[in-house]
Every structure is written in C-alpha cells, then in structure tokens.
Amino acid sequence: MFPPAENLSTEVFARLPESLYQTDRPSQWLEDRHVKMHSFLEGPSFDREGNLWCVDLAHGRLLRVSPAGEFEQMLQYEGEPNGLKIHRDGRVFVADHVHGLMVHTPGSDRIDVLLGSARREGLKGLNDLVFASNGDLYFTDQGESALENPTGRVMRLRADGKTVDLLMDGLAGPNGLVLDEARKLLYVAVTRENAIFSLPIEPAYGGMKKAGRFLQMSGATGPDGLALDEAGNLVVVHAGAGTAWVFSRIGEPLLRIRSCAGIRTTNAAYGGDDRRSLFITESEQGVILRARLPVPGRPMFSHA
C-alpha cells in the first residue's frame, strides 16, 4: 500500500548502572509474569533543566537521567508506575496501575494519590497519561483488559482537578496516548488490538464522537508509547519489535527506528536543544536509546 519506511539507527544514550539493578528485590509485577528483571523502564519525560525522568515499573521507582546520561534514583515506593509526565509547574504526574493517578514534587520523599477513583467507581489500573495545552490530563485505564476482556477505558481529568470525563470504554489494552496541537484528535495505542485508534474530540463540549482505527499493525506485542512531531507525524513505539515507527498524518510509514539494544522498546520522548532527538526506553536491557530525526518534536507540556 505504501513504500517501505526508511531505516534509521539508534545509539545508547544511557544505560542503567549495575549499582541500581534490583534483580533480587521482591516484585509482585514480576512474580505475576514469572520473570526476573533488574528494571523495566517506561514513561520518558523531560523537565525544564533537560533531565529525562522515567519509571521502573518492576520495582516502583522514579528515575532521573542527566543530560550527560547519568542515572539517579529519585524515589521508590510500593506501587507499579507505568507512565510519567511533568506539569509546567514542575510536579511529576505518574499513572500507577495499583494506586491510580499520583503526584510527586521533586526534592520531596513523597508521592501522593491525586485520583484513586473516577465517576463513583474504582480505577482498573492506569497505564499512561498526557497533558493537553490547556492543562487537561488524558489517561488510559487499562487494568487487565485484553481481546477476551475488552474493558479498558480512556478518560480525562479536566484542568479544574475535579471533573473526570469518560471518552471511550470497551477497549482491549489502551496504552500510550497523545493529543494533537489543536486538542481535536487523540491518538490511543490499543496494544491487544495491535492498533492505533483516533478519537475526535468535539470542541463544543469536549466529548468524543466517531472513533476510528488509524493504523492496523502486526506482529510483536503491540503498540505502546506515542509521540508527535511539529509536522503532525506520529511516533509509535512497537513493543516486542525493537522498533519505533514514524507515520505521517495520513498513516504513511516514513521511518523505522531500530533498536541497537534489546527488542522491548516501550515509550519515547523528543528532547535535546532542538527537539530533534528521540529518546526511547528499552526495558530488556535497561537503556535509553537516542536517534536523530529530521523534524523536531512538539514541546512537552512541562516546557509550554
């Protein structure tokens, strides 16, 4: 249907040092999957000082990587942090599968629950989150949803910090999500469908109408994290394929960014002085990959 995407290589920007490995630490998340791993990195996001924050899902940690590629453990708690985004006021918001939506103030030793339930019922298990330019926070409530249990949801916490909207339910593994600049189109990675859905946001009342399937992918585990560049091109990190794809706004594959480390690529964030560097978490080896792209990424909410 389309010509093959151009291949693009990566390099290792940072590697979790052995001093921060936690292979022997008990982890319910790992026990449920019958595996042992020293870390499982996700949720890369930049603060205003150029540090890259990410989470370690396996061991309940918030990590920070300096511009020089040096890891530092900022916080560890009993939870399962999946996604991370930074508010323009510097607070770190975390989508936690166990506790819900959480907030950490850098420099403190606390992380607090901001939203543990929604619409008079419990949350299933948050996965990822993204801020709109007006401060609304969109998030996926994945829980244990899958093709045989399509109960995942996409929701929004409005900037007032009180109103929660249900945009779509009945999903098989809603995961990463990203909103276009005009706040009119929300892309959602639906991992167990191996697809990217597009959710048009109605400007008049902020609801969603007539969702569609923007991309149908194949192989590996499925799409995980998403990012957008200034031209509206969509980055899709394909978990289990060691790949981050770049698709045009009409769904044409433009680039295939191949991991130079393992195949468990999870999430991505644009960064660097010119925002032309794409940073990708790879969870098998505990590394942050970096690739140079031709179009700069959209500024993150933390930099707006």
Image (cartoon, rainbow, N blue to C red):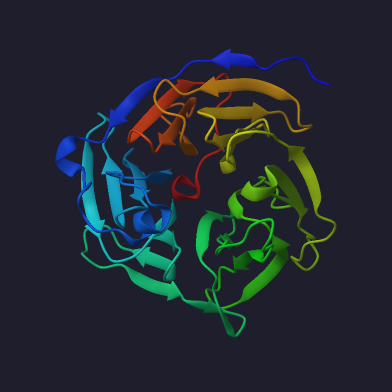
Q: Residue at x 61, y 28 (%)?
A: 245
Q: Position of residue 54 (x, y in %)?
A: 36, 46
For the residue pair 240 and 15, the one nearer the viewer reads as 240
Q: Residue 96 lies in what quarter of the image? A: bottom left
Residue 188 visible (yes or no): no
Residue 209 visible (yes or no): yes
Q: Position of residue 109 (x, y in %)?
A: 21, 64
For the residue pair 244 and 86, the one nearer the viewer reads as 244
**Image quadrant containing the N terminus:** top right
Q: Is residue 127 left or right of residue 172?
A: left
Q: Is residue 160 left or right of residue 284?
A: right
Q: Farthest front residue?
A: 34
* As drawn, 164 above or below 109: below
Q: Residue at x 66, y 45 (%)?
A: 181
Q: Position of residue 89 (x, y in %)?
A: 39, 58
* As drawn, 200 above or below 262: below
* As drawn, 63 above or below 70: below
* As drawn, 247 above or below 118: above
Q: Residue at x 76, y 15 (%)?
A: 3
For the residue pair 5 and 49, the one nearer the viewer reads as 5
Q: Position of residue 147 (x, y in %)?
A: 69, 56
Q: Residue 195 lies in what quarter of the image? A: top right
Q: Residue at x 60, y 77 (%)?
A: 163
Q: Farthest left residue?
A: 19
Q: Residue 105 lies in what quarter of the image? A: bottom left
Tally of numbered discs: 0
